[in-house]
Amino acid sequence: MSYLEPVPSGALASLSDKELEVLRLLAAGHTVKSIAARLERSEASINERLRDARRKTGVGSSRELARLVDAQKIWDKKPDLSAPVLPADHVVQPPKAGRPGPKGRKIMLIAMPIVAAAGLLVAQPDTAQQTAGRADATTTAAAKPSPLVGRWSLDVARIPENERPRRVIIEFRESPDRKWSTHVEIVGADGSRMEADSTAATDGVPVAESGNMPFIDTVSLRQPAPNTLVMTLGKNGAPVSTRVYTVGKDNRSMTETIIWASTGIPKLETTYFNRID
């Protein structure tokens, strides 16, 4: 299956609970060995579950399938672009109705930031030492920039030639007040140029997008992990797509999982970016 081909409708739903459990652990960064230890199973048993999952879905890579399963979980939260979202690790073809532009551009319906995760903490009384320790940890975390910060270039060689743009650049910047600025530049095969800019907090609240991309007008974002941004693009108050950007452990590669809005099980696509600076 090509990385641009959608997973057949209902394929993810055919996976068993045990297969989903292994795939979610894989998406969280575990290896077959660590999954086997965690579940008290043999590595052969874990590999068998992964083979069965790939056979059911037609996805050739276990890690790619794990990302799709994780992205499906994010989409099931159904972020709302019309109102603030109530308080996602490691892409998708829209239905023909309302699908923007030629197929080459749909891949580049590049994102600005959205979606995701709420945690509830059960608080216990803190000692002064515990409080001070947590404050030090928070300060250290805040001082360390997210691996997402920087400029990223789409790996156009992995896109079919008839859909391939000349260049796609996406840049993420994080300000001291924890807001994210995103700049996207798309140069089509014919030399046409589109740009989009946005600045948003990671609170899921939609903000206006500026630029000359006619298929989006709002952006919202969430940051469920330091190496992940989950973003939703909208047009006229309706969601267009949700995109999950995840930086690899090498800090030089980034995947973009795209989940197109639809009335049924969403279709998924993946594109790949490399760090420029």
Image (spheres, grey):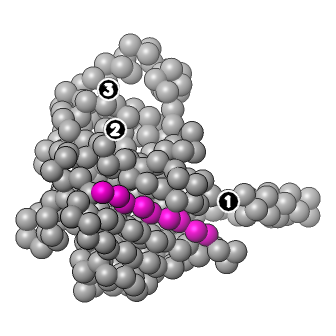
Residue, disc 3: 50
- Horizontally, residue 83 falls left or right of residue 15, namely right
Please name the predominant secondary structure of the magenta segment in the image: strand
Q: Position of residue 172 (x, y in %)?
A: 53, 65
Residue, disc 2: 64
Figure check: 180 above or below 123: below
Return the residue nearer the eye: 267 or 254.
Answer: 254
One can see residue 134 in this view: no
Which structural element holds mark 3?
A: helix
Residue stretch rendered in magenta on the structure = 166-174
Q: Residue at x 62, y 58 (%)?
A: 146
Q: CA distance from mark 1 to mark 2?
A: 27 Å
Q: Quadrant of the C terminus?
A: bottom right
Amino acid under label 2? Glu
- Horizontally, residue 270 falls left or right of residue 220, namely left
Q: Residue furthest right?
A: 129
- N-terminal of the two: label 3 or label 1? 3
- N-terminal of the two: label 1 or label 2? 2
Q: Residue at x 37, y 60 (%)?
A: 168
Which structural element holds mark 1?
A: loop
Q: Position of residue 111 (x, y in %)?
A: 37, 67
Residue, disc 1: 145
